[in-house]
Amino acid sequence: MTTVDVASVLDEGRWSPYQKLLIFGTALAIVLDGMDNQLLGNVIPTLMREWSRPRAAFTAVLALAPLGMMLGGAAGGLLGDRIGRRTALLCSVLSFAVPTLAIAAVDSVAMLGVFRFLAGLGLGGAMPNAAALASEYVPRRQRPFAVTLTIVCIPLGGTLAALLAGQVLPRYGWRALFIAGGIIPLALAIVLFLLLPESPQYLATRRERWPELVALLRRFGHDVSADATFVPATTAAGTVTSRPSIRALFVRAYRRDTLGLCGAFFFCLLANYVGFNWIVTMLTSAGFAQIDASSALAAFNFGGVAGALLGALVIQRLGSRITLLGMSALAVASALALAAMPLHPPMTVGLVAMFALTGGLLNAVQTTMYALAAHVYPTEIRGTGVGTAVAVGRIGNVVASYVGAFALDSGGPPAFFTTWAAAMTFVLGSLALVRRHIHAR
């Protein structure tokens, strides 16, 4: 009988084609998470006209989804640590698909808010479990890139939502968007059920599932005997957390990192969702056509995809402290440059490029922070740690609904862009507090 430390075996192993396929599967879930999350921001101008309601009537609705995501992120992380990341991720996908499909039938702001809140529970629960799965499928040296490759699909999904809105809204109406936003994730849930295995590090803590773990490690390319004994990973202090809890995040060893991560997630999600929720409305109010406004949002998201992937590669070379602090500082400068630019039709290449650049920096910081959070915490509390940081961040997401509306009403586009600069300044300070940054490889 041999004793196997699963964490060490995975960390020092190769990144096999099968493991890359699993990362692709988790990434697909987050593509649709990002798409469903941003559908509403694209249709608000249409709903304002169709339902004869002012912009302010939708502020609370925009806040309800992130409120659900806040609760879903915390609950989803704890659930993933207790029943498994795979099970929690599948439940989350179903939980945001069904309410999104139901939105296609609503005829009032109140019911729209109810279903957006319910969808938010699933949207919030998906991300910490996807991040935990991605971090535990791959060797340590590929972990920042794998987690970022998964979470970067949030803005990729947002790009998809914006492009779909630009084509579907004029032809088929807003209800068709939500029908697609519900049916596609339901189909994906079936695919993920067949494709994704449970996290190997989670399986190591469940003796009754060791045969499943042996088969999985063999698929990863490791020669493991059928009668192997598996030992769980240990924390930095050399002890094992017996039961995941939020209290474990605030012991002396993790308190400063937890506070820094929570602050960074709060302000970065605030900045990003001021953009996601209000860019289209801001631009259409300034006289831009719907298709141009949606294209700007698509550029904001697409820039985030490129920026996050580049950021993940830079982290592997320079570490996360230099990379994240540098990108946060550049985001402040870019937002201030946008605030100083004139904003009037027609849409110019320069303006689209600035949306892409700023979106690239904001989204790059946001998505790579998931890799940082997964790095900070040991496997026993990884889902709880990531979920808690994201849940606190969702408070910023809720606040963004009101901050964006207030900025537009009080100062127009310059005030809108200045909120990005202010929020990213606080992100910079919060990330400087974190001690367990990812080291250069």
Image (cartoon, helix red, strand yellow):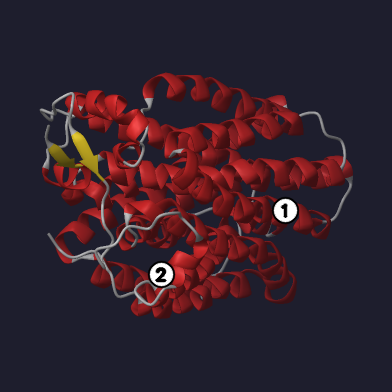
Q: In the image, 300: left or right of 307?
A: right
Element at label 1: helix
Name the residue that disc number 2 marks: 331
Q: Position of residue 293 (x, y in %)?
A: 60, 49
Q: Position of residue 259 (x, y in %)?
A: 46, 74
Neighbour tally class for label 2: few under 14, some 14-19, many 20 plus, Cα within 10 Å: many
Q: In the image, 326: left or right of 34?
A: left
Q: Nearer the viewer, residue 87 or 252?
A: 252
Point 24% across, 63% down: residue = 238
Relative vertical location of residue 192 with respect to residue 3 in this rendering, above or below: above
Of the two numbered discs 1 and 2 in the rendering, the one whose residue sits closer to the viewer: 1
Specify the amino acid type for callout 2. Answer: Ala
Q: Nearer the viewer, residue 253 or 420?
A: 253
Relative vertical location of residue 367 with respect to residue 197 in this rendering, above or below: below
Q: Nearer the viewer, residue 425 or 285?
A: 425
Where is residue 316, by image quadrant? bottom left
Q: State which tag comes first along the sequence, 1 or 2.
A: 1
Q: Position of residue 113 (x, y in %)?
A: 78, 47
Point 21% across, 59% down: residue = 314
Point 36% across, 30% down: residue = 208
Name the residue that disc number 1 marks: 64
Specify the amino acid type for callout 1. Answer: Leu
Quadrant for the C terminus in the image? bottom left
Distance of label 1 from label 2 (alpha carbons): 27 Å
